[in-house]
Image (cartoon, rainbow, N blue to C red):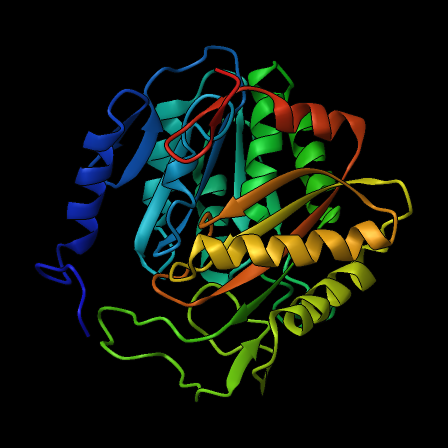
Amino acid sequence: MKKFINSIDTMLDESLNGFSKAHADIIELNSYPHFIKRKQPSPGKVALISGGGSGHEPLHAGFVGLGMLDAACPGQIFTSPTPDQMLAAAQTVNNGAGILFIVKNYAGDVMNFEIAAEMLDIPNATVLVNDDVSLPKNHSIGRRGVAGTSIVEKIVGAAAEGGADLATCKALGDRVNSATASMGVALSSCIVPALGKPTFNLNENEIEMGVGIHGEHGQKTMAFTSAADIVEHLAGIINDELKPQKSQSALLHVNGFGATPLMELYLVYELASAYWQKQGIIIARSLIGNYTTSLDMAGCSITLTILDGEMLHLWDAPVHTASLRWGC
């Protein structure tokens, strides 16, 4: 294993220190307990808080700022943040209009955010993101929250920035989540630094279909094939889930897992956009790049969100974070 590491024990601290210095104009780091907070608070605004294990950067810390999150709580690599992080973050960024937690559907995240919410003496609500359609709806632990999380954070963040109240933000987040579906594929596993080796092995003629974002095995191992065939498979499962209607507008997000070149991601976007355009779907907005990663995994996910007029307007609203920035 070759990585830029001084010590596994200090890796997260050093990374967060570097992140906070690089983006000191928009965010601040609270060291103990760890959370990233927005530097310029907005009184009277619903405060959005998300978080999860590190290793998915820029999710979530990269989305703290104007038009998105008020705070992000990073756990250790692929490990849920603790309730005290969430509680401290909520108490710090409370603007007087309540707290909205945006939580990916992983058992540790859900449990710890629930504990924090119960301890919090501030009005709060939770949006549970479960956009991963590689798992059936009746799966024992439910569907995982993956790349669609950033879509929820952006659209709801814009609504909160515009003055929407807690109930409205919660309902909007649930609506965006239900209009969003994601599916991922890996060409290789990631290497968790503490483990020092790939979490699963693929030979040169295999891919892992339906992976999550924690280096776990996917839905099934398949034969490696052309990009066109891989995208057709991913898009077909997403399409069967959402059943978009002709002339509906959509946001198409092609997300890299950390080790896939942009050249390949744009190729995937070309194939995926052509797939839905053939069916009469209007790809009104797009997002391509590494936004919800799995350390150094090679692979990508495709996310489709069916947009109504309000969601499209909120997606276009100004945002100023480390990793999304437009209209400012």
321 is higher (above) or lower (below) than 271: above
Q: Kindly indicate the quadrant of the structure image that contains residue 229.
A: bottom right
Q: Position of residue 217 (x, y in %)?
A: 50, 79
Q: Could one spot residue 52 in this view of the protein?
A: yes
Residue beneath the point at 67% across and 69% down: 228
153 is higher (above) or lower (below) than 207: above
Q: Is residue 222 left or right of residue 179?
A: left
> Residue lying furthest left in this view?
6
> Residue lying furthest top in this view?
43
Q: How many marks?
A: 0
Q: Position of residue 324 (x, y in %)?
A: 46, 32
44 is higher (above) or lower (below) than 200: above
Residue beneath the point at 43% across and 22% down: 94
Task: State which quarter of the image contains the N terminus.
Answer: bottom left
Q: Position of residue 14 (x, y in %)?
A: 15, 46
Q: Nearer the viewer, residue 12 or 168?
A: 12
Q: Is residue 17 left or right of residue 324?
A: left
Q: Nearer the viewer, residue 294 or 38?
A: 294
Residue beneath the point at 32% across and 20% down: 39
Q: Could one spot residue 130 in this view of the protein?
A: no
284 is higher (above) or lower (below) than 271: above
Q: Nearer the viewer, residue 90 or 282?
A: 282
Q: Position of residue 290 (x, y in %)?
A: 44, 50
Q: Kindly indicate the quadrant of the structure image that contains residue 166.
A: top right
Residue beneath the point at 56% across and 82% down: 224
Q: Is residue 150 left or right of residue 53?
A: right
Q: Kindly indicate the quadrant of the structure image that contains residue 215.
A: bottom left
